Structures are given as C-alpha cells and as structure tokens.
Image (cartoon, helix red, strand yellow):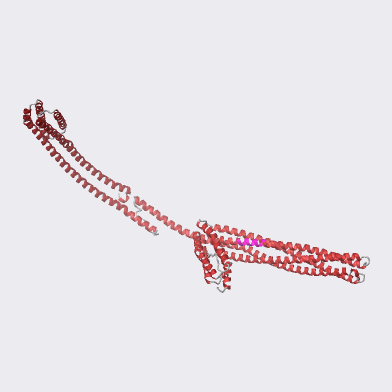
Amino acid sequence: MSLSNLRISMRLSILTGVLCIALVTTIFLGRSGMSSILNSLHTVYEDRTVCLVQLGTMQRNLFRIRVRILKMLDMNAYDATMVAQIADAEEVINKEWKTYLTTELAPDEKIIADKIKAALPDYLSAKNQVIELLKANDLDKATSLANGPVLQKFMYLDDQIVANIELQERIAKEEYERGKANASQKINTSLILGGLALALGSAIAFVIAGSITGPVNGIKGCMEQLTAGNLSAEVPGVERGDELGQMAKAVGVFKEGLLRVKEMEAEQEAQKIRAEAERKAAMRQLANTFEGSVGKVIQTVTSAATQLQASSTQMASTAAETSAQATTVASASQQASANVETVAAATEELSSSITEIAKQVERSQSVASRAQDEATNTNVQIRALSENANKIGEIVNLINDIASQTNLLALNATIEAARAGDAGKGFAVVANEVKHLATQTGKATEEIASQIKAVQEGTNNAVHAIDGITKVISEMGEISASVASAVEEQAAATQEIARNVEQAAAGTAEVSSSVVTVEQAARDTGAAAEQIHSAATDLSQQSEFLRAEVGRFLDQVRSDQSDVKLLNWDNALNMGIGTIDRHHREMFDEVNRLYVKMSQGNGAEAGQGMITLIDTVMENHFREEEEVMSRNSYPHLDEHRRHHRDFLDRAKSHKSAVQSGDPTAAAKMFEYVATWLTNHIQMEDGKLANYLRAKKVA
C-alpha cells in the first residue's frame, strides 16, 4: 500500500506505535535494572547494614560491661547501680544477637556466628563470677579472674565480632559492586535502545513529515496562486487517498467556486451596466414625463400671468376713463349748481327775467340729461371693470390650482427620487426647490386675490355711487321740468319755484359729492390695477425662474452623475473684487464637487467634506471679507457679520445631524448651504460691492 493512500492519523499512529514500543522496551529494561539495584540495596541494607548495626550494638555493650567491672575493681567495691547497668547491657546484647541470627547468613558469616554463639554465654558466665566475687568482697579473686580468664574470653569474643563486622563490610561492598555493574549495564542497554528508538522514530517521523509537508506546501502554493487571482493553477494531490487528498479536493472545490464567483462578478458587472442604463433611461423617461407635466403647468402659469397683466392694464385704462368721466360729470354738476343758484338769486326779479329763467332751466335740463348719460356710461364701464375683476379672480384661482398641481408634482418627484436612492438625491433637492417655488406662487396668487377683492369692493362702491348719481340727475330733470312748468305760472307759484330751486341746488351738491366719490373709487381702482400688474409681473418672473430651474433640473437628471451641479456661477454674482470673487467661485466648485460625490452614493464622505468646507474655507472667507469691510469703514459691517454668525450657528445643527448618521442630513445641509450662499452673494455681498465701487476700491 502506498504511503500517500494512508491517512495521516494512520501514519502518526505508526510513528506513535514504534515510539511506544521503544519506550516500553526502555521502561522494561530500566525497571529490570532498577529492580536488580533495588534487590542489591535490599540485601546490603537488610543483610549487611542492619547486621553491622546489631554487631556494633553488641560490641558497644560488651565494652560497657567491661568498663563497669573495671570501675568496680578500681573502686574495690560492689556497686549495685553498675551491676544494674551491666544487666541492661547484657539484655541488649542477647536481644540483638537473637535478631541477628534470624537473618540469612553467608557461609563464612555462619562460621563466625557459630564461634560467637559459643563464646558469648561463656563470657557472660565468667563475668557473673567476677560480680559475685565483688559482691562477696573478695577483691583479689575478682581482680585475678577479671584480668585473667574473663579478659581472654572478652578479647576472643570481641575479635569474633570485629571479624564478623569486617565480613559484613566486605560482603556489602561486593553487593554494591555487583549492583553498580548491573546498573551500568542496564543504563547502557537503555541508552542503546533509546538511541535506536530515537533514530528509528526520527526516520519514521521524517518520512511521515515529508509525506505531509510536501503535499501541504503544494496545496499552499496552489492556494497562494488562487488568492493572487491565477485561477488556471493546477491543484496537486487530488488523487491521494488521505486527508491531504481531501484537502486538495476541497481546494479544487474552492477553485471552482472562485471560477463561479468570477463568472458571477462578470455577470453582475454586466447586470450593473444594464441596470445603470435602465436607471438612466427611467430617469430620462421620468424627466420627460415631468417636463411634460410641469411644462404645461409653467405654460399655463405664464399664460395666466400674461392674461392677468393684460386684464390689470385694461382695469387701469378703465379706471382712468372712469376718473375722466367722473371729472366731466363733476364739472357739469357744478355748472348746474351754479345755474340753479343764479335762478334762486333772480327769483325776486322773476317777473322781469322769466325768459332768461326759461333758458337757464332748459340748459339745466340739457346738462342734467348729459350728466345722466355720462353717469350711465360710467356705470356701464364700472360694471365692465367689475366683470374683468371677476375674470381676474377666476384666473387667480386657476393659478392657485396650477400651484397646487405643481406642488403635487414636486411631491411625486420627491417620492420618485426617494425610490431612486442615493442616485436621486440631487433630483430630490431640485424637486424641493420646485415645491418651494410653487409655494411662493401660491402666496403671490393669494396676494393678487386680496388685491382683486379690494378692486371688486371699490368697483361695487363705484356702481352704487353712480346709481345714486343717476337717480339724483333724474330728479334734477324732473325738477327742471317742474321749473319750466312753473315759469308759465310764475306769478302764482313764485314760492314753489324758490323751493324747487333749493331742492335743485341740494341735488346738484349731492351730485358733485357723489362724483367726487366716484373719482376717488376710480383712483383706488387704478392703484389696485397697478398692484395687480406688479403682482402679475412678479408671477411672470417667478414662472420664468421656475422654467429655468426645471430646465436645469431636467438637464441634470438626463446627464451623467459626474456632470451634476448644484450651483451654477453666473456673471451676475461677480462683485468686481478679485479676491472675493475667486473665493466665491472656489466655494461653488467645491460644493458642486461634493454634490457629485453625494449623487454617486458617497453621502457620508460628501457630508464630512461639506463640514470641512464650512469650518475652514467659508470661515476663512468670512474673516477676510470682514477685514475688507473693516478697512474700508463699511457702515453695515455689524449686520453683515451677524449674517455670517447666523449661518455658522444654523450650520451646527446640520453638522450634528450628518455626524449622527442621519441618511437625509447631507442632502439637507447641501440645500441649506447652496440657498444661503446664493442669496447672501446676491443681497449682502451685492450691497458691499456697490459700496466698494462707490468708494472706487473695486
């Protein structure tokens, strides 16, 4: 069986088995050697060391007995204490001797032991005789016996014990030498076997390691090539039957997965391109639809504004004509009043000037008839003015409806932009501007509606006043007819004529007053018409601005995202001051660059870039601009500086929202900065530019 087909665990088991066999063999030999050494030590200790101790104890106690006897002889007296000590020593000797005899004795040792066994009782008996003689106070015999036979017996017994001790030392040394040689042999054998086991284990380990590391390195190199993107690399070892073969097969699966991933990435890239094309097509379609809807709205608003301007012009013309007619009526009524007063003054001379009175009355009738005709004509014109005002009201309602529809379309555009995600954020910003313009249009139409209401009220008042004038003039005609009839009967009706003349004078005065009211109403109507004309002009300008903004918005939607611009530099924004104008253009360019980045989906990075723009570029620009104003004693420096501070304060909330991760914060901050920057340059910086040009600084 090939080694490559053995599992790694089997190979490691073989290595482990060989090492275990070597280890067991080494342990067995070591244990055998240690057992032999242990037996030698046991023999040395039990049979030699213990015996040496026992023999030494017997020897010491024999000397103790000898010393005690000699002391008593030296004292020439029997001492019971010493005798008791001698008895104790004798007891120890007997005890140790009995214990010694229980051990295994070597042949030479047994010979010496037999000699000691025979000599020990003989010595102890002779010693007792000496003690008895001392007890009997026979010192001479005791001394003679102690220094004679007893001494010889003692010396013989001591020699045998010494010989036995020397024998024990010799045998112990022999046992030690045998154990030492045996241990050395066992150690050498263990070292040889251990070395052989180590060499065999190392060889097996080297072979097994080579059978593992080689394929592993091959698989590793293959994986490195796959990681580097070389998907054509061959996977080695797939034919192996071990774990490395399984690893190679797994790497092959990994390679196939990478190939599939690469294919999927290519497919995803193609899908991404198709999706981008579809998105652009959808955005263009949406732009076309929006252009069609909003274009109609703008066209309607523009048409309505034009019609409103024409109607306001017609109202102004009608009001002027009404004022002129009212002036004519006033002049005629004043003339009639003067004539009636003349008639009243001549009543006393009525009899002599009847003919003149008849003429004046006839002329008064003619004037009254003319006044009635003029009043009727004025009434017709005022009613036409009222109808025009009503038509203007209808147009205003139409404009209001159009503003509502524009607002609705802006809302729909905002929704579509939200669906488009980050790509529609620019769309949402412009849609918000469209919504803002629609709101301004609604406010303008409300203002126009209020002005039209005032015009309608003025025209209604004028109609009522002219109706009163007509009635008064009609009464004047009746009165003049009565005067003519009364002339024929002047003699009998002088008092009646005077009364009628007074009524005619009062009527003409009332006509004059009413005509003045009509003239004032006509002037008010003219002023209202001027206001309507101004509002219509503003509405027309707003519609044109809306048209331009919608056009810019649609151009951005139809263009590639890299061409999107939030701010467009216009020559009207030039102040004529090189440094400040350059700063303004740089800020516009940076805002547009960051806006493109946001439109491409990098909202967080674009928001952070806008924060940096505000905190560095804009603040430095504000500082330099304020230094220019301070050097040139600009009278509105504090107000201009307050605008700068207000902007920076309001920008803090936008910056906090961006830093908190609000997904809509970046778009809101772009809208705020773009709107503020454009308005500030046009208004505040425009005033500064005019001042500097007047001082010939620019």
Range drawn in magenta? 436-446
Q: Nearer the viewer, residue 693 or 224?
A: 693
Task: Give how far across and how far down residue 124 sits, in percent.
Answer: 11, 29
- Judged left or right of residue 510, residue 603 is left
- Judged left or right of residue 504, residue 564 is left
Residue 15 seen in render: yes
Q: Nearer the viewer, residue 684 or 550?
A: 684
Task: Give how far across and how far down residue 116 sits, in percent.
Answer: 11, 32
Asked where in the image residue 393 lies, by quadrant, the reply is bottom right
Residue 80 sits above or below residue 411 on the image: above
| Outermost bottom residue | 696
Q: Which residue is located at x 21 percent, y 41 percent? A: 34
Task: Give how far across and how far down residue 422 sits, in percent.
Answer: 52, 59
- Judged left or right of residue 235, residue 36 is left
Residue 558 seen in render: no
- Judged left or right of residue 386, residue 556 is left
Q: Does the magenta run of residues contain 136? A: no
Q: Which residue is located at x 40 percent, y 56 percent? A: 255
Task: Give how far across and how far down residue 640 sits, in percent.
Answer: 56, 65
Residue 144 sits above or below residue 218 on the image: above
Asked where in the image residue 180 lies, by quadrant, the reply is top left
Q: Nearer the viewer, residue 101 or 681?
A: 681
Dominant secondary structure (helix, strand or loop) of the stretch shown in magenta: helix
Asked where in the image residue 468 lies, by quadrant, the reply is bottom right
